[in-house]
Amino acid sequence: MTKTYKKTLNISNNFKYDHILNFEDREYTVAVLNGKSGLIDIKGNPLTEFIYDDLSEEFEYDMGYEFGWVNFWKNYDKYCRMRMNGKWGLLDRNGNVVVDFNYSNPVQEWGENFIIMINKDDFLTTGFIMDKYKNIHLELNFDDIYPRINYAIVVKDYKFGILNNDLQLIIDCKYDYLNGGDGYQYLEATLESKYGVIDLEENIILDFIYDSVTVEKLNNRYIFKAELNNKSALFNEKGERIA
């Protein structure tokens, strides 16, 4: 038992990397070498130089999917956010630089476009949308933006609205809160502390009279759960009560 233990210690002393993140069903991951990060493939071959900031703790604990690996529609397994000398950029799965490392905030993906938010007065107030060829398509004037597959939720002066994939503001920033899943056609919405459901054309499906609402998609059908006075009910896509 003692000899086996000593042999294990000797082997570990020859380990190359400081840390290797989980692959999470991908063909590559982040590894840390001498305090710097880079990408390696499933065989352990380096895909990049080890010149990026060590974000292993943030990837695994603090950032999760929002700032770590990109888990977004067709870009799953395609891009990885990294930081170099304190500035954020984006690498593809082969280690190529897709977005230069010039930005104070993590880059967000939206289909084939990238959302860059700029710090101003310690608050996110300006930014732009750039394509993979680094062409700027739209300068943003929102406090924040949350991309989904078929739209993006935007925030201005603490009010929520919707930007479509053609970069048009289809729902003005007037709601206290909006929320919807990737590919969803219906949104949970809040006005004056009351909850309802709207669609992407801003038709009201459930009136703003509820204490809370939840939009769920099951087998391409939507069900809306509403809470009122500590009671629950279910509604279909037509706003008809079914339970």
Image (cartoon, rainbow, N blue to C red):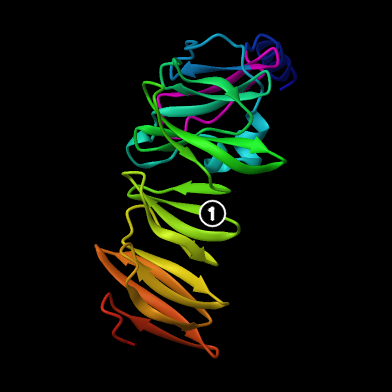
What residue sits 49% from the left and 41% below the top? 140
Image quadrant of residue 158?
bottom right
Q: Amino acid at mark 1?
A: Val
Query: Which quarter of the figure is the C terminus placed in?
Result: bottom left
Does the magenta segment cover residue 7? no
Q: Position of residue 124 (x, y in %)?
A: 62, 43
Task: Determine if residue 180 is in view.
Answer: no
Residue at (37% x, 24% y) in the render: 132
Quarter in which the N terminus is drawn: top right
x, y percent for residue 53: 66, 21
Give the magenta part as a residue range: 17-36
Question: Mark 1 = which residue?
Answer: 155
Identity of the residue drawn at 44% across and 60% down? 172
Return the residue nearer the eye: 214 or 122. Answer: 122
Tell me if residue 102 comes above or below residue 230 in the rendering. Answer: above
Q: Is residue 87 left or right of residue 214?
A: right
Residue at (51, 11) in percent of width and height: 48
> Is 23 inside the magenta-drawn segment?
yes
Q: Position of residue 145 (x, y in %)?
A: 50, 47
Q: Is residue 122 left or right of residue 200?
A: right
